[in-house]
Image (cartoon, rainbow, N blue to C red):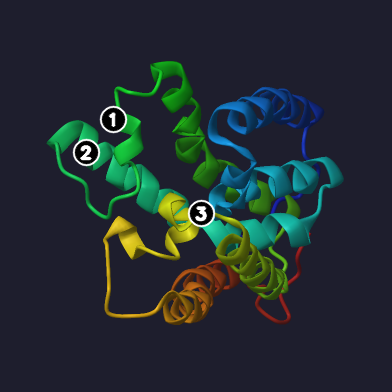
Amino acid sequence: MLLQSKSRRIPLAVKLAYLLWMTVWVPVYWVFNGPENFLWLCDLANIILLFALCRESSLLISSQAVGVLLIQVAWVLDFLSALLLGSHLTGGTEYMFDTGQPCWLRAMSLFHIAMPPLLLWGVYRLGYDRRGWLLQTVIAWLLMAATFLLTDPSLNINWLWQPFGLPQSLLSPHAVLLIMMLAYPLLVVLPTHLLLSHFSYKPPGRHQE
């Protein structure tokens, strides 16, 4: 099947390379962007992915695949649209063109480009665990609650105050939080879960090596 491999192991070289990247990325983001930055779904996914690769956990990598794959692809498309066409599709990558930030610091966010193929490759190697959607939904709800309670609304982490970065005054912050908590599993997690489940499905009665 498309999302399965005879060899289910993650090569040591991949684990070491990703660990090396994280030993650089985490301290840099902590110092320059602040610890609250790790409450972003995509940033937390980087940390969870480290454990998924090192432990060769199908459940962990599946949870992150359903959780951020679509978001990462949207980031890439928005960035490329702004870079090549001069306009953003969805928003969210404006900071990549902020000359007030060092170029090297902005370049560290290019991990978004590598994440979709890495997540798909990881699921291919380890297999897709259909419990991943449930785990990621719980993680996301806890993350959104922490974001709402602990961070400055001006940071707009996880777009809980300004969805897609657009100011809004029609709904209360609590209403926006509730909508985001419902929309995320329905519009992000579920479609990805159905897609990965389809490609990892084993037809009954067919021998699988």
Query: Which residue is rendered at x = 72% and y = 67% of the image?
Result: 129
* Residue kind at label 2, given as amino acid type: Ala
Point out the tag, 2 or 1, that comes first from the N-terminus.
2
Residue 135 seen by the camera: yes
Residue 23 circle label: none
Inspect the image, locate mark 1, and give the three-letter code of the amino acid beneath it: Phe
108 shown above or below 113: above
Which numbered marker is on residue 82? 2
How far is mark 2 from mark 3, CA to CA? 27 Å
Q: Which residue is mark 1?
A: 97
Please tell me the numbered disc located at residue 152: 3
Relative to 9, 101 lies left or right? left
Category of crowding for the residue at label 3, using alpha-carbon neighbours closer than 10 angstroms: few (below 14), some (14–19), many (at least 20): few
Q: Residue at x 38, y 47 (%)?
A: 75
Image position, residue 20 (x, y; %): 72, 23
Marks 2,1: beta carbons within 8 A: yes
Q: What residue sits 48% from the left and 40% below the top?
A: 112
State if disc 1 and disc 3 touch (CB < 8 Å). Answer: no
Please, what is the three-letter code of the amino acid marked with disc 3?
Asp
User: Percent x, y for residue 78?
Assistant: 29, 46
